[in-house]
Each structure stands twice: as C-alpha cells, then as structure tokens.
Image (cartoon, coloured by chain):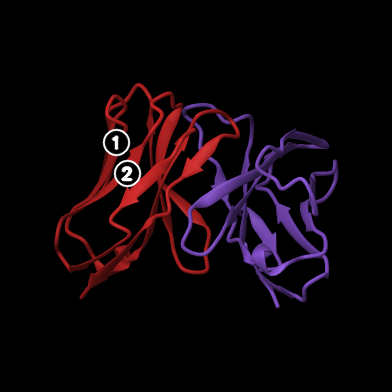
Chain colours: A red, B purple
Amino acid sequence: KQEVTQIPAALSVPEGENLVLNCSFTDSAIYNLQWFRQDPGKGLTSLLLIQSSQREQTSGRLNASLDKSSGRSTLYIAASQPGDSATYLCAVRRSSSDMRFGAGTRLTVKP
Amino acid sequence: NAGVMQNPRHLVRRRGQEARLRCSPMKGHSHVYWYRQLPEEGLKFMVYLQKENIIDESGMPKERFSAEFPKEGPSILRIQQVVRGDSAAYFCASSPRQVSNTDTQYFGPGTRLTVL
C-alpha cells in the first residue's frame, strides 16, 4: 500500500531564505510525482510534475527532485517570498485513478 | 477557458439530510475525479468517472455515497443521510483523457461541507 509522508508539517521562515520541503513514499512503482500548492479556501495548483524516469524538474525559483530507489522527493524553493505562503502537497501516481497525497507542509514566509 | 468549477463552494447540512455537490469539468474534459480532504489530512481519492461511466469507485464508501457524470451536465457527488464525519472539503479534478505519466489533473476550488 502506498503511503506518502511530508515533513515538516509546518514551516515558518523569514523572507529571502532558501528552503527544502520533503516527501517520502513507500512504493517505488510510480507513474510520476507531483508537487501542488494549495491556498486557503482554494483548489490545488500543479507546480511541478516529475515522470518516473526523470530525476528533477525546475520552474522559476522551484526545483523538485525525485529519487525513486529511496522513495524520496524534495521541493526546493529559492529566495522565498511572502507570496509563497501556502500549503504544499506532494502526490504520487500509480495509475490513472490511483494518486496518493501527503498531508502537506504549511509554509509561512514572514516579510 | 474556464477552469474546473464546483458548486456550491460551501454547504451546510443537518445530520440525516442529503448533500449534492456539483462539478463542471474544464471544456473538452471528459474524465472527472472526486477527492475528499478531511481536516489536517491529505486528499483521498474517491471515484473516477468518464462520461456516463464509473471507471473506479474503490475509494468511495459503499453506503450513502454515489456519483454520476451524465452525458449532459455536471458530475454530481451525492451523499445521503449525512453524518458529522462527512464534514470535509470535496475536490473535483478533470482531465481531457485517461491520465498518463506526463499528464496532470486540473482541480476545482472545492466544496466545503459542514454537517451540523
């Protein structure tokens, strides 16, 4: 059974700091791994999608890595800004309908 | 192109009443997925539907819950005789085809159900 764990559950940093969010999963047989952003009262926005054959993806100040053998992914956010404050969710996909989410990391970036 | 739309955004029901949650997928999308998010927990898959067909309902409780995606109109998630434990945020997502390893789903803003 696929379990997805995100650490830490909450993180507060000053503006400008670089930070790393962690995601671990128990079953390495995955299609892909995605990082989403969830703002309060809103839906999920896809940030980065890493296919199972890939090692990392980058978009702007965001970089996500994937190590299938160890069941880990990290989301690196460079030069954090107050607008980055949100909950970040990691999700692994095993099939069209089997997508498992972590509980999220709630990030606060203080001005 | 409007995104995935869900209504209502907030729904309050008393125990024993019925809740109907609607999801209009993005234009051109014929695949719909429903997820439930309990407080302080991750999203959990409930059901995957294609037009007029339920493809996978392995995540949906066997009793009181049902889902449909008719040929015309939105997808409906129906909860009969709601209980307090049904209070959660219900998210709908859509995709234009069966999701592969390069595809993403597009999520709606969610419906927050509160059962009094």
- The type of residue carrying mark 2 is Cys
Check contact, mark 1 vs mark 2: CB within 8 A: yes
Return the residue at label 1.
Answer: A72
Measured as percent of width and height from the top left, residue B36 is found at 60, 54
Q: Residues within 10 Å of mark 2 (few under 14, many from 20)?
A: many
- Mark-to-mark CA distance, 1 and 2: 6 Å
Q: Chain of mark 2?
A: A
Residue A12 relative to residue B80: left or right: left
Q: Residues within 10 Å of mark 1 (few under 14, many from 20)?
A: some
Residue A41 relative to residue B5: left or right: left
Q: Dot 1 lies on which element?
A: strand
Q: Dot 2 lies on which element?
A: strand
Residue at the farthest left position: A17
Q: Residue at x 32, y 32 (%)?
A: A71
Q: Earlier in the sequence, mark 1 or mark 2?
A: 2
Q: Quadrant of residue A4?
A: top left
Residue B11 relative to residue A11: left or right: right
Return the residue at label 2.
Answer: A23
Measured as percent of width and height from the top left, residue A52 is found at 38, 25
Q: Chain of mark 1?
A: A
Query: In this rendering, is residue B76 above or below B97?
Result: below
Measured as percent of width and height from the top left, residue A48 is found at 37, 42
- The type of residue carrying mark 1 is Arg
Measured as percent of width and height from the top left, residue A51 is found at 39, 28
Q: Residue at x 46, y 52 (%)?
A: A45
Query: In this rendering, is residue A24 above or below B8?
Result: above
Quadrant for the C terminus of chain B, please. bottom right
Q: Residue at x 63, y 53 (%)?
A: B4
Q: Which mark is residue A22?
A: none
